[in-house]
Amino acid sequence: MIIKYPLKPREYQSRLGLEVLKGCNLIDLTELQRSQLKQALWQQGVIVVKNQHISASELEEFARKTFGNLMFGSNSFSLDPEISPEIQSQYSAILGNPKGLDRKPPEKIYGARIWHQDKDGVPIIKELEMNALYVVMLYGIKVPEEGENGQPHTTEYLDLVEAYNNLDSSHQKALEEILMYQMPPVWFWQNLDWDNVPKKVHPLVSTHKVTGKKGLYLGSWNTAIPLGMEDKQEEAQQYWQDLWNMVLERTPVYSHVWEPGDIVFWDNSQVMHRGTFYDSTKYQRIALRLGVVAD
């Protein structure tokens, strides 16, 4: 486990990243084991199950049996003939370079590399609150031998419950009064007028549906706007950035070091995350991402 402060690496005991169900195959779990996995996820925020060898369709089947049927994916799914059908399904997104090494270094696209909370279709569905138990699973099938600057390939997570607890009581109370518009990923609405953008109003300080713990719900710099700043986009983004900088200064970062067969689960109502770069001209990465709203 690697935990780091910005610019100052240090050892830290985080609740994030607990390994669960050692020696188990996710497609053969009992109901008791499924319940134990969910309870561990709500308590820890991020958990990992290691040494898995399952297909994309089996991952979907596991998600339905464990969490429920509400997933976000393509309504017009069709197989890509250049990619193995074993890693394709309607709701599993393939991340990385599954068709082989890139011929030239791709441009650094920062979408998944900036800190954010996955929302996908949550702001669009009327029945869902923003702190719905939206779980994302990331399954590492093929892992780059190294990431940035010769370091292991990682995904980074930040504990928003701890971030809230690290604030003094007066600051906590002040933030509890603030409401935020939360919107889907920016690609969904960037060409829409404000009145037509799908959005929901949600407290900046959120209460977890299972544990009852309070934590921050920040979204991301381009999908969260404080109520009252609708017409002040630059000011709204600066407010978010200042708050985020303070959170990042006070809250250690947990970095999951990937190994083939890892499936990492995270509860988006409790954590933010970001991906990290790797050289796709030298290394291949194949990962499956699946999001599901727990019943």
Image (cartoon, rainbow, N blue to C red):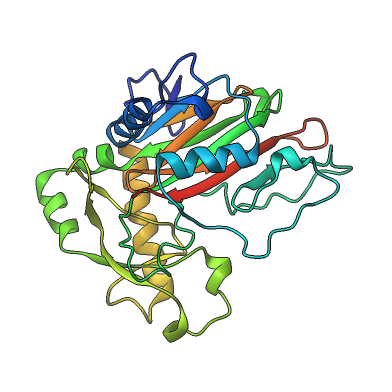
**Can you say whether 8 is above or below 171 in the image?**
above
Left or right, 150 with respect to 155, comes to right
Most extreme residue toward the top is 23
Of 92 and 200, the residue lying toward us: 92
Q: Position of residue 252 (x, y in %)?
A: 36, 31
Q: Nearer the viewer, residue 206 or 124?
A: 124
Q: In the rendered view, tell whether residue 16 sits above or below residue 274.
A: above
Between 208 and 7, the one nearer to me in the picture: 208
Q: Residue at x 40, y 67 (%)?
A: 123
Residue 67 in percent (x, y) is at: 40, 44
Camera sees residue 113:
yes
Name the image quarter holding residue 190.
Answer: bottom right
Q: Could you tell me residue 136's position as x and y percent? A: 47, 44
Residue 248, position in %: x, y? Answer: 37, 41
Q: Is residue 207 left or right of residue 51?
A: left
Identified at 70% across, 40% down, the residue is 87
